[in-house]
Amino acid sequence: MRFKNVCWKYSPKQDGTCSVKIYVNHDGKQKYYPVDGVFVAPADFDDKRGVVRSKHPLATVYNAKIRNFRNKIEEHFLSGGTFNNFKDGHTVSLSLIEYLKRFISEAEMGMHGLTPSTIKNYNNLLTRLQGFASTLPARDVYFDEINKKWESEFTKFMCNEIGVKLVTV
């Protein structure tokens, strides 16, 4: 995982200023997140240190904005976040658990036409997913992370921790 502050010189504005972006390389994927409201001339940005040079009149304000935004990004990714659930500087929940909670509450209000026993089964699934998520570093299950590896880990959890037989999973 790598983070870096960069001056985006590839598409300058008409006045010659460029946006400052935070470069993120995580699990072989790369993305640039623009810092809102920070535009500087390339000569006013120190590429090596990743900060606005002190000769710029708004250097302290811009550097504080850059540092604050980078801290948000680092905190998000270091706590198990992904590219898909970080938009515009805010963590967006694409959580299976949150979705299931919302679905169950709607079903209990009669919005989906499910029987009480089906709603009970969904509640059991939610409890088991929350138990499984507590063993994960991110403490949550995101839609984009569900794959064959996740399936085998969940199956192992269900068999070993819960005591469910393999045919039931």
Image (cartoon, rainbow, N blue to C red):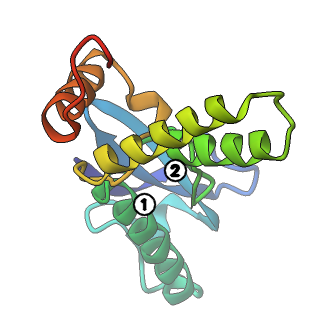
Give the left or right position of residue 70, taking residue 157 as reference: right
Which residue is drawn at the image coordinates 59% and 56% (left, top)?
19
Say left or right for 56 vs 107: left
Residue 97 rendering spot, x and y as whole percentages: 51, 45
Name the N-terminal-most of marks 2 and 1. 2
Residue at image mark 1: 73
163 horizontally vs 3: left or right: left
What is the tally of numbered marks visible in this picture?
A: 2
Task: From the viewer's perspective, tell me whether residue 162 is left or right of residue 121.
Answer: left
Under circle 2, the secondary element is: strand
Measured from the top left, where is residue 116 in percent x and y?
Answer: 70, 36
Image vertical order of residue 154 relative to residue 75, above or below = above
> Would residue 74 be visible to someone looking at this image?
yes
Residue 9: image location, x then y, percent: 52, 46
- Report the quarter where the C terminus lies: top left
Which is nearer the eye, 17 or 34?
34
User: Is the Cβ of the residue at disc 2 closer than 8 Å to that at disc 1?
Assistant: yes
